[in-house]
Image: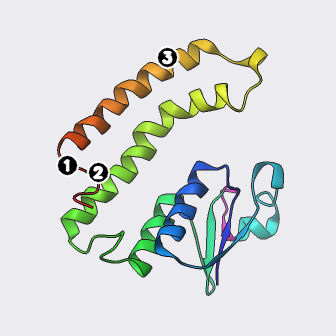
Amino acid sequence: MLKLWGRTNSINVMKVLWTLEEIGLPYERIDAGMQFGVVNTAEYRVINPNSRVPTIEEDGFTLFESNTIVRYLCAKYSMGGLYPEDLRARADTERWMDWATAQVQPVMTPVFWNLIRTTADKRNHIVVAENTLATNRTMEVLDWGLTRRSYLGGSS
């Protein structure tokens, strides 16, 4: 059975969990990261030298980096489903996944950390305001993509 290391409040783990649920693949999730520790142990660093989550293990094969894990799972278990068989359609879908990581996360993360993970007395409201504006500009690209079709990944 596939094992997934990670905590459910990690956006990167959530990507993998969502994929596993969409595919319907059974898995065992192991709490790791932040309050659960694990990621800084010597045993974990053998499978993920970054000491971060998520990491998966399946039949002796380990993999880290959430987008790569999602691609692997889709290619192995959902080719033609979540993962388009047509190369151009697949590249188009992957573009949006990478866009979310490269463009959305850098501007949304400071807002999230300041408003959710930081106590009110320590929040940096200038950082929140600047990154909220940047997030709104970034979402214009999302709007652009959705004006062209019903879903970012195509017709389904």
Residue beneath label 1, please?
149
Q: Quadrant of residue 82?
A: bottom left
State how far apart marks 1 and 3 are (Cα).
30 Å
The type of residue carrying mark 1 is Arg
> Which quadrant holds the C terminus?
bottom left
Horizontal side of 3 relative to 141 (left or right) equals right
Which of the two marks, 1 or 3, is nearer to us in this view? 1
**Residue 152, numbered label:** 2
Query: Does 61 appear above or below 12?
Result: below
Q: Residue at position x 73%, y 27% from top?
A: 118
Which residue: 65% across, 31% down?
113
- Please provide percent x and percent y for residue 89: 22, 63
**Are discs 1 and 2 less than 8 Å apart at CB?**
yes
Rounded to the nearest angstrom, the CA distance separating label 2 from label 3 is 27 Å
Q: Secondary structure at mark 1?
A: loop
Magenta range is 47-52
Question: Quadrant of the rendered structure where residue 117 is?
Answer: top right
Please tell me which residue is depicted at 76% across the width and 62% down the height of the picture. Answer: 31
Query: What amino acid is labelled 3 in the image?
Result: Glu
Instruction: Give the class, few, some or many, for how many residues have Cα within 10 Å of label 3's Cα (few <14, many ≥20).
Output: few
* Residue position for label 3: 130
> Are the residues tagged 1 and 3 within 8 Å (C-beta)?
no
Quick check: 54 left or right of 37?
Answer: left
Amino acid type for the residue under numbered disc 2 = Leu
